[in-house]
Amino acid sequence: MIAAIFDLDGTLYTGHISRGIVQHHKTHRVKRLHVGFFFCTHMPIWWLQLAGLLSEATMRKLWSRHMGWMVQGWTPQDAAKAFAWIAKEYAEPLMRPDVIAILRDHQEAGHRVIIVSGTMAPLLEHIDRQLGIDDIVGTPLVLRNGRYSGASELPICQGPDKVTRLEAYLDGGDQVDWSQSYAYADSYTDLPLLEHVGHPVAVYPDDKLAAHAREHGWGVIS
């Protein structure tokens, strides 16, 4: 089996899922205190990364790990309404037509298309439905007494753990011909995922990934 693995934020679409959550909560006037607390505690992490005092990989992992704070207390049914809105109203208009066309080519070729992202898995499911994709690997949220606790299940689907979670999803991945498979991502932090396949493609890459892709003769979409 040949797989085609796609990152989400910055790859399939131009936005960031945290902005979609904020847009939903602001529009519907819900959980604004949760949003405010999340950003008050996480913007300093971003500033530390910009100042070179924290790695981008650590920053991304912390942001993804705590994203569930913004849906804390909701039942899955409550959250599903918000997730469907975010997928339709925020993510869909920002999809990259050129990258979606490549995704469709893989589907037509009979490849197994999988989205692998640090995004909350229940939200990722709604984005996949918009795209007509069955396979997702995201960051699961912890449920307690039928409600989201705000915590995420470890490991967070970022960096090397994208490969860990992907292989777990595929029961080890022995049925996949990785040398003939494809991966698409925009960030240097996705290097472990890109190096896991025979056909890595840097999609609108950051400077560090663009340089690495050129050096190694990888495909680049920009």
Image: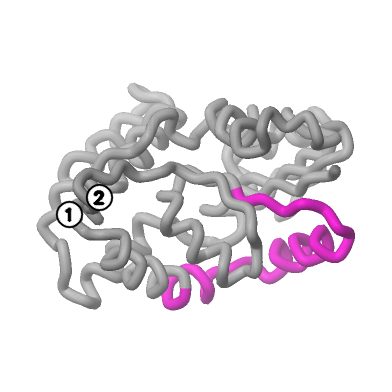
Q: Residue at x 53, y 28 (%)?
A: 161
Quadrant in which the N terminus is drawn:
top right
Image location of residue 65, percent across then percent down: 34, 37
Amino acid at the residue labelled 1: Gly
Please tell me whether the stretch drawn in magenta is mainly helix, strand or loop: helix
**Residue 171 vertical position relative to residue 140 in the rendered view, above or below:** above
Q: Which residue is mark 2?
A: 148
Q: Is residue 134 left or right of residue 178?
A: left
Mark 2–mark 1 Cα distance, whole angstroms, equals 5 Å
Above or below: residue 195 compared with residue 7: above
User: SS for tag 1?
Assistant: loop
Residues at marks 2 and 1 touching, judged by CB atoms closer than 8 Å: yes
Q: Position of residue 112 (x, y in %)?
A: 77, 52
| Extent of the magenta region | 88-115
| Badge 1: residue crowd in 10 Å (few <14, some 14–19, many ≥20) | some
| Residue 106 among those drawn in magenta | yes
In front here: 107 or 171? 171
Horizontal side of 23 relative to 190 (left or right) equals: left
Q: In the image as oriented, which residue stretches furthest toward the left? A: 33
Q: Identify the residue shown where x is 29% and y is 47%.
A: 68
Q: For the residue labelled by badge 2, is the local secondary structure a helix, a strand or a loop?
A: strand
In the rendering, at what x and y percent does residue 209 appear? 64, 36
Which numbered circle lies on residue 73?
1
Residue closest to the far top: 53
Foreground pick, 57 / 153: 153
Give the residue type at disc 2: Tyr
Q: Residue shown at 31%/66% (left/top)?
A: 77
Which residue appears at 47% of the width and 76% of the height?
88
Task: Give above or below for 52 relative to 143.
Answer: above
Residue 214 visible from this viewpoint: yes
